[in-house]
Amino acid sequence: MNREIETILKALNETPRLLRELITEIDPELYKKKIINGKWSIHEHATHIAVGDVYGFQKRLKDFKRKAKPIFEPLSGDNFDEDFFIKLELEKTVNDFFEIRQQTIELAKAFDPNDWNKLAIHPEYKTYTPYIMLRHLLMHDHNHLYKIEDLGFGIGHVK
C-alpha cells in the first residue's frame, strides 16, 4: 500500500474520535435543534457520518474487490426517510462508529495493488478509483464535522 493511501486511512481512522469529541463538547440542548431552518441538526449530521460507511462505502469497497469495473450511483442522505437520521440514538450510533470505521479500513487494507488500480463508472466523476472514493469519504467526514462544529459553537450560539 502506498503512502497516499496510508495517509488517507490514518485520517479516516481519526474521524470517530473527532466526532465523539465534538459531540461531547456541544451543549446537548443543541443536538436536535434546527438552527438553520430546513437544514440538518447536529444530531442528523453526526448520525449521517456514523452510518455512511455501512450504507455506501463498505459496499463500494466490496464491489471494487469483486468486480472488474463496478458501476456506482451517487450516494445521498436524500435516499433515506426524512426522519431516518434523527431517529437514530446519537450516543450509541457515535460509539458504534468506531467499529464501523475499523471495518471500512480493514476492507481497504485487504486490497492488493491491482484492486487499487481498478476503475469504476460513477456519473459524478470522470475517474473513480478506490483511492478517490476513500479521499471523498474523508472530505465527506470533514464537511459534516465542520457543520457540526459551526452549529455547535458558531451560529448555534448567535442570539
Image: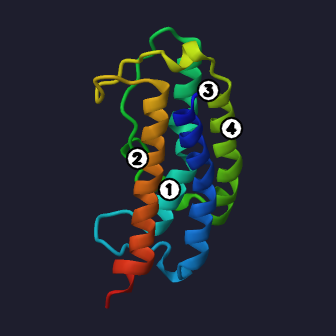
Which mark sits nearer the N-terminus, 2 or 4?
2
CA–CA distance in space, label 3 to label 1? 34 Å
Q: Label 3 sits on what residue type? A: Met
The answer to whether any part of residue 33 appears in the image is no
Q: Residue 5 in the image: state x and y as whole percent.
A: 55, 34
Q: Label 1 sits on what residue type? A: Phe
Crowd rating for badge 2 (residues with CA inside 10 Å; few <14, some 14–19, many 20+): few
Residues at marks 2 and 4 touching, judged by CB atoms closer than 8 Å: no
Q: Which residue position holds label 3?
A: 1
Q: Which residue position holds label 4?
A: 103
Which mark sits nearer the N-terminus, 2 or 1?
2
Q: Residue 50 in the image: state x and y as whole percent.
A: 57, 52
| Residue sitting at the far top | 68
Q: Nearer the viewer, mark 4 or mark 3?
A: 3
Look at 62% across and 30% down and name the residue there.
108
Q: Which residue position holds label 1?
A: 85
The answer to whether any part of residue 50 appears in the image is yes
Asked if residue 135 is positioned above or below residue 46 in the image, the reply reads above
SS under mark 4: helix
